[in-house]
Amino acid sequence: MKKIAVAALGAIAMPFAASAADCGEVVMTEMNWKSSQVVTAVAEFVLEQGYGCEVTLVASSTVPALASVAETGKPDIVTELWINGAPSYGKMQAEGKITTLTDVLSDGGVEGWWIPQYVVDEHPEAATLEGILANPELVGNRFHQCPEGWGCQRANASKGEAAGLEEAGIEIFQHGSGETLAASIASAFENKEPWFGYYWGPTAILGKYPMHKISLGDYNEKIHMCDTDPECPTRGQGLSEYPVGPVKTVVTTDFAEKHPQAAAFMTNLSFTNDQMNGLLAWMDENEATAEEAAVHFLTTEKELWMSWIPEEDVKSTLGGFF
């Protein structure tokens, strides 16, 4: 797979790079979840080969990425920011430190608490939060929490406190990475065991395994934003559903002003949930890396990604390729 990917990438890159414009050094996030890693790999290729950027990737996650921008002005590009878990986003946008380019997931992301459908089929009372709290053994007396540093970790901690998970005898199990969280779901399905916890989409997991979403009630913006803010005095005192989440690509305002061509391309780079689920499922089935998934996408969806490149760049900067 790796050799095929490298060969295919070379076949695309040679004519593409011939007329690239020089945009200099660009620092871009490589978040620790797969959909973001795919977005980053696709963006990295086009920025390097099409716009002459020298891209440096930095491993990050939601909260640290914006904290770094606020403190250092880097990274230049945050490719996939779930703003529901980023309480500093609005303030930084208002202060002009960041510029929002696009909804990188055009129909938004979904977050929430889930259990396997087979658990509900066997125990209908587990279909609701109230039923789970009254019968915690049906979900293995455990809530699978997302990794430290993710915005959802803070939100889940607050929602779990409001719901009374621990009082009901449900242990909060802190996962160390997105990979172990996903593996716990796969293992549960393989063994038909109970599972209860947080997950999100688009992901190969939600596409591959039938899951039932547990309602946390109506969405209340004030309560949910308080969930994500460690300084909020009323955290854990109200329960709100996760909203359908806006998922943005943001850049520093300095980058947007200095590199309008690259910013224009990033403004057009956007996937639907179905498109991203398909790529993530392909990755899972082929045990592929994000870079290999990017090559697969670039070689099979040329019409789509070409549509992201502004017409003037197709005619000039990228003319040798097209």
Image: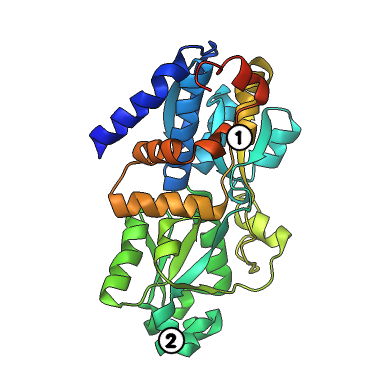
Q: Is residue 167 above or below residue 220?
A: below
Name the secondary structure under disc 2.
Answer: helix
Give residue 49's position: percent from left, percent from top: 46, 20
Give residue 58's position: percent from left, percent from top: 43, 29
Report the front residue among 126 and 289.
Answer: 289
The residue tagged 1 is 307
- Horizontal side of 183 relative to 313 (left or right) equals left
Q: Residue at x 62, y 18 (%)?
A: 315
Name the secondary structure under disc 1.
Answer: loop
- Horizontal side of 182 relative to 93 (left or right) equals left
Mark 2 is surrounded, within 10 Å at the Cα level, by few (under 14), some (14 to 19) or many (20 or more) other residues, namely few
Coloration mode: rainbow
Whichever of labels 1 and 2 marks the residue nearer the N terminus, that label is 2
Q: Give the total of numbered labels.
A: 2
Give residue 89's position: percent from left, percent from top: 65, 40
* Amino acid at pointer 1: Ser
